[in-house]
Amino acid sequence: VFPSRSPSALDCNAPDLVELLLQRERRVLLLGPPGIGKTTLAGDLVRELDDRGRPVWCLGADPGSPVSGVPGAVCLGHWTQGVWVLREMEALCTLDAARFRLPLVSAVARLAQLAPGDTTLLLDAPGVVRGVAGAELLESLVRSAGIDLVLVLHREGQPIHLARELHGLGVELAPIRASRQARRPGKASRARHRTRLWETSLQDGEEHLVSLRDLQLLGTPPRRAPEAWQGKLVAFLEAGRTHAMGEVTGMQEETLRVLLPAHRRPTGTLLVRDACRGGDGLIGTAKAFAAGLVHYVPPPDLLPDGAADAPTGVRPVVQLGTAMAALVNGVFGDPLLHLRLRHQRRSLLFDLGEGLRLPARIAHQVSDVFISHAHADHISGFLWLLRSRIGESRACRLYGPPGLVQQVRSFLSAILWDRIGDRGPVFEVTEVHDRCLRRHRLQAGLAEVAFLAASAEDEFVLLQEPGFRVRYTVLDHGTPVLAFAYEPTVQIKVRKERLDQRHLTPGPWLSGLKQHILKGEFSSEVTLPDGSRATVADLAVDLTLAKSGGNLVYATDFADTAQNRQRLIALAGGADTLFCEATFVDQARDQARRTGHLTTRGCGEIAAAAHVRHLIPFHFSRRYEQEPWRIYQEIAALCPQTVVPKS
Ligand SMILES: [Zn+2]
Ligand SMILES: [Zn+2]
């Protein structure tokens, strides 16, 4: 039911306005920023018209702050003898009218057709009145609902939002001065109101169990984890129409428990977006997928000053256990991924693109640089690294495809080193010739290249350390390119409470057990302190927990070939985070083929096939600088694990 009559926007404008509405059957859009009194005005108008015997239908198209009806949906209802009756609704499963404006507009278009022609239709538009989203929404809502009059609420002495767009619409406009008392209700009170409406819609509801395997998922389904589904507002669809809206109250294995209104049953199609009940019990918007884990605003100490203004597009940052990875030059800039191992005061770099300068302190703690290949956008930053390492005695290790030794040597020999003696920066360069690794030592100021060793590598391990290892695979980009996997060591934790329950005393047998688990020797037997024997497999399940820090895979500049796909899927299988190039949109596949790059399709399909938990696409062609969302949309359609930055 509409809120009370005052304070009202109508007081100063009422007579004219009601006459205007009574002239004929009108379709009216109420436009204004949040809190300006649209709701109150709508309520007043409805009552005035109802008093004069004019039937009024209402189309609630503000999914976040609905007057009545159901939040996260577009609702059509009418006002009959002082009672609001909901007739039809179309679920959006989001409160965010700006982000999901396309589904919003199509829902409005359909429901507006259902309102009888001989009535007044009031369309309560979302409070999105700025920018591209506001302009687009206004125009689309007017067209799709056949609006012929727009009531424009504005504050005295303030400009009217979307003034230019309004005049281009070709429909009648009626500016209405907002009441001075009109205030936007606080965030919390809006959330409470919304939650009350939601709970009313589920009164006397029943819980149903549905298997995700049997469902066709639409919208933006979250990853298959209970915490990602808990509390989600969902809608079961039938023949493309909303059959029932409900709430996920639990998830076990692949089965969802969903609360639906009475007498409603699940169908085979489930729509889900970002509306959900939060930890505070209120209906709101779920944090973007992987928020908390992946940010697009890096902490300031990870990137140089001024980074915020650089024209590089978004800069993803990922937290991986105790490590943190930042794509320094963003998704459009030269590739350079900075992986900081926080507890070791040490950094690994993947590629050496030029762009933002990392602080000198970081350059000094770079121990290893993994270079995919020596195209200019991947190695031009070497001069920065070289300069920053003057005065550093420890060698910096570089890894890359054949030719890297000569390339580094040429960089070094391009500079006059007459004052440095034998204190020039040292580089240990490993060239990867398929399975053979060839190591060399180069020092600035010394002409000769020292050959150190060659070794065969069966497991594709480039670097093995107690805390992690880095593996590689060779991809084809018209020239060999390396893709890398950073793999933190799995940690085996002993469950002390289980030891206590089984009266087992800790001892050297436990480290023996851990070794067996780490080596995958699950059928071996271990002797327990009480003299009994048990298999590693049984003990592993009963006594230990395996904890992985999360693998990170970095792959860029390679063609979409069957062999490249197969190799990268093998390297990235089950990885926590895959950074993968997506240079072109699918439509530009010919150009991708010519240049040996991937399209959005290749990127999304590889990540989906590798079952990675997060996909972070990057190395976008600059031609998409104005429309990065196009790339994200295409990839996310193929791989729901794509981390899409919030707009
Ligand atoms: Zn490149
Ligand atoms: Zn390249």
Image (spheres, rainbow, N blue to C red):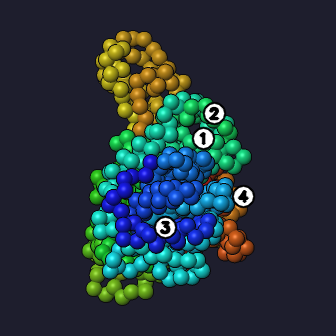
Frontmost of labels 1 and 4 is 1
Query: Which is nearer the eye, 312 or 526?
Result: 312
Residue in the image at 72% along x and 46% along y: 239
Q: Which residue is mark 4?
A: 562
Whether residue 270 sits left or right of residue 366 in the image: it is right
Task: Give coordinates of residue 105: x percent, y percent.
Answer: 60, 62
- Measured as percent of width and height from the top left, residue 406 is found at 51, 76
Q: Mark 1 near mark 2, Cβ–Cβ under 8 Å? A: yes
Q: Which residue is mark 3?
A: 18
Task: Name the residue that disc number 1 marks.
Answer: 244
Residue type for callout 1: Ala
Mark 1 or 4 closer to N-term?
1
Residue 470: % across, % down:
47, 54
> Which of the 4 image quadrants contains residue 530?
top left
Q: Are marks 4 and 3 in contact (CB under 8 Å)?
A: no
| SS at mark 3 in the image | helix
The residue at the far front in this view is 52
